[in-house]
Image (cartoon, rainbow, N blue to C red):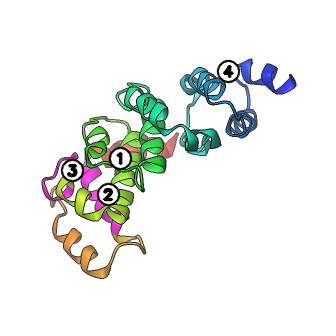
Amino acid sequence: AESETFLKQLPHTYYEEYMVHILLLGEIKDYDTCMKVVEEFLPYIDNWAICDGLSPKVFKNHKPELLEKIKQWIPSEHTYICRFGIEMLMRWFLDEDFKPEYLKMPASVRSDEYYVNMMIAWYFATALAKQYEKALPYIEAKRLDDWTHNKAIQKSCESYRITPEQKSYLRTLKVKKARSQKKIQRNSYEQD
């Protein structure tokens, strides 16, 4: 009862309260209850650490329903709702539940938000590690914006899950004149 009351007290005042919130959400065993509370919480997320720390265990056993929510979250204009959707797609749908058409969802996102673009890059770096043959055409066709494209290649090349041969090839696909706007934007976030 105390935790239920706490989960309804939004917004919180302190970062630590948000950390407790995501830990409590992660332990909810009923999918419908968990999803309701997650959706109530998502608009209050205002940083990547809380966003990336939110990972309800119950999602593992409800992937079809989760996928429908992911399809709603990814197009969101809210930075951390979009990021959370892409992260859930990366976490739960790049292994045995992977389908090539899922790559289209993060590839279709266009954002000026650093934390959205970093998640897209992270998603594609992970997709290259787990589903190389299916993800590679997105990089070869340069279907991401220049900055995100290059960041996905960079993250892939930093991964131990990518072979040296794959890394060499990926490096040849970097965009030489990537837009500097993203770098400027990132620097402004770092100053905040």
- Secondary structure type for disc 1: helix
Task: Give percent across and percent down for residue 65.
Answer: 48, 31
Circle 3 residues within 10 Å: few <14, some 14–19, many ≥20: some
First of labels 1, 2 by sequence position: 1
The disc at residue 152 is 2
Q: Earlier in the sequence, mark 4 or mark 2?
A: 4
Earlier in the chain: of badge 3 and badge 2, it is 3
Report the residue marked by disc 4. Answer: 11
Residue 155 is a magenta residue? yes
**Dominant secondary structure, magenta:** helix
Measured in 3D between alpha carbons, the distance from the residue under mark 4 to the one under mark 2, in whole angstroms, is 34 Å
Q: Amino acid at mark 1?
A: Ile
First-in-chain label (1 vs 4):
4
Residue 24, picture quadrant = top right
Answer whether labels 3 and 4 touch (C-beta < 8 Å). no
Q: What residue is pinned by disc 3?
A: 146
Residue at the outermost left position: 141
Q: Are marks 3 and 2 in contact (CB under 8 Å)?
A: no
Query: Is residue 111 rendered magenta in the image?
Result: no
Note whether 169 is above or below 126 in the view shown.
below
In percent of the image, x 73 and y 32: which residue is there?
Answer: 14
Q: Which numbered marker is on residue 27?
A: none
Which residues lie in the magenta part? 139-156
How would you rate the neighbour count of disc 2 (Cα within 10 Å): few for under 14, some for 14-19, many for 20 or more? many
| Residue 69 vs residue 173, the one in the foreground | 69
| Labels 3 and 4: the sequence-earlier one | 4
Quadrant of the rendering where the N terminus is positioned: top right
Residue at mark 1: 120
Q: CA distance from mark 1 to mark 4?
A: 27 Å
Image x and y of residue 118, in percent = 39, 48
